[in-house]
């Protein structure tokens, strides 16, 4: 169990390092107003952030997911493993149910973490790094403390319900997809490891399937969590955000930033699975590594 925890932490950290720039682009595209668009699309957003804010602008808010990663891994490992032992192993459906349970529980950590990340990612949007005043928020923890002082505990929980709606089915799809693909691609010899390319493919496709399954909810979550950053709130609540977003931009608003998300999903999960697998194979050379989620490992989405 301890080795699985360490492996998950290392793999998740690798995923954050690879994928955070894409996540910053996703949040910028999701939250920009329809009547004042700074970015025309994924690649234009990348270029503009680097041009105006330097390459470090792509890594704004990364402290929050890195700090929260350890707690999320611990929660998901414990919940997913215990649920699988109760309901039975070897079934894709059970992988979905166990993953959904894990996704629901880790929302308690994930939601405030993503709130701070979103607020940090939107700081200085469209401003040149050399001319921008020194930011008031030092880091993600300081961001949460300032939200708490201004809005109380309720402010720190902004978007938690939407995060729950997103994470519960998304983690179910994620774990079930990975389990299914690994079962299809596993060698016939049970003593052989699944190939590295197959492992990376399974992880990448699992991330893509997971994001597609709940992406519209993620768009609304980002808008609700970003609301009020400029000092003025636009939405009265989740339903108001959903309706007004549709009225202003049509159904395509719910796919805003999807390209950058899917581009990010594959390498993030491929990197995560690779790091986890290499670590476990190195630490357990005499034991075959179970590459399906019937024997659960965490791979950060």
Image (tube, rainbow, N blue to C red):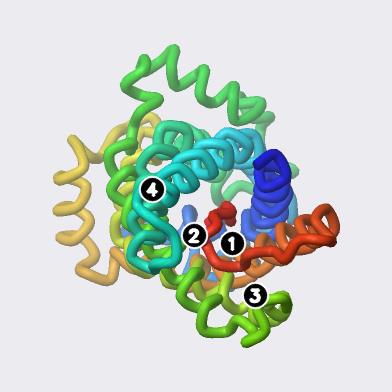
Q: Could you say whether the residue bearing mark 2 is in a helix, strand or loop?
A: helix
CB within 8 Å, label 1 to label 4:
no
Disc 4 designates what residue? Answer: 222
> Which tag is nearer the camera, tag 3 or tag 2?
3
Q: Could you say whether the residue bearing mark 3 is in a helix, strand or loop?
A: helix
Residue at 83 percent across and 53 percent down: it is: 283
Asked whether residue 243 is in view, the answer is yes
Disc 2 designates what residue? Answer: 26
Q: Check the image and report above or below for 286 versus 40.
A: above
Asked whether residue 229 is in view, the answer is no
> Which tag is nearer the camera, tag 4 or tag 3?
3
Quadrant for the N terminus in the image: top right
Disc 1 designates what residue? Answer: 22
Q: Count the numbered circles shown.
A: 4
- Between the residue at mark 1 and the residue at mark 2, the CA separation in whole angstroms equals 6 Å
CB within 8 Å, label 4 to label 2:
yes
Upstream in the sequence, badge 3 or badge 2? 2
Q: Is residue 21 left or right of residue 242?
A: right
């Amino acid at each position: 169990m301890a080795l699985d925890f360490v492996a998950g932490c290392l793999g998740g950290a690798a995923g954050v390092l690879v994928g955070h720039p894409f996540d910053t682009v996703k949040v910028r595209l999701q939250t920009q107003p329809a009547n004042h668009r700074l970015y025309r699309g994924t690649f234009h957003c990348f270029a503009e952030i680097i041009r105006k804010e330097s390459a470090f602008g792509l890594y704004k808010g990364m402290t929050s997911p890195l700090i929260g990663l350890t707690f999320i891994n611990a929660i998901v490992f414990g919940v997913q493993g215990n649920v699988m032992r109760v309901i039975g192993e070897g079934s894709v459906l059970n992988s979905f149910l166990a993953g959904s349970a894990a996704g629901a529980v880790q929302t308690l950590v994930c939601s405030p973490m993503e709130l701070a990340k979103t607020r940090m990612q939107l700081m200085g949007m469209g401003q040149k790094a050399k001319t921008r005043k020194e930011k008031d928020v030092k880091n993600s923890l300081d961001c949460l403390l300032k939200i708490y002082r201004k809005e109380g505990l309720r402010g720190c929980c902004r978007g938690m319900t939407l995060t729950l709606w997103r994470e519960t089915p998304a983690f179910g799809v994620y774990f079930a997809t990975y389990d299914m693909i690994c079962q299809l691609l596993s060698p016939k010899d049970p003593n052989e490891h699944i190939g590295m390319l197959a492992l990376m493919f399974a992880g990448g496709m699992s991330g893509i399937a997971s994001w597609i399954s709940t992406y519209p909810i993620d768009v609304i979550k980002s808008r609700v969590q970003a609301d009020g950053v400029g000092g003025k709130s636009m939405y009265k609540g989740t339903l108001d955000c959903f309706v007004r977003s549709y009225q202003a931009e049509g159904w395509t608003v719910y796919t805003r930033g999807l390209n950058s998300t899917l581009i990010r999903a594959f390498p993030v999960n491929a990197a995560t699975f690779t790091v986890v697998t290499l670590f476990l194979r190195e630490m357990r050379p005499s034991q075959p590594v179970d590459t399906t989620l019937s024997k659960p490992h965490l791979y950060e989405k």
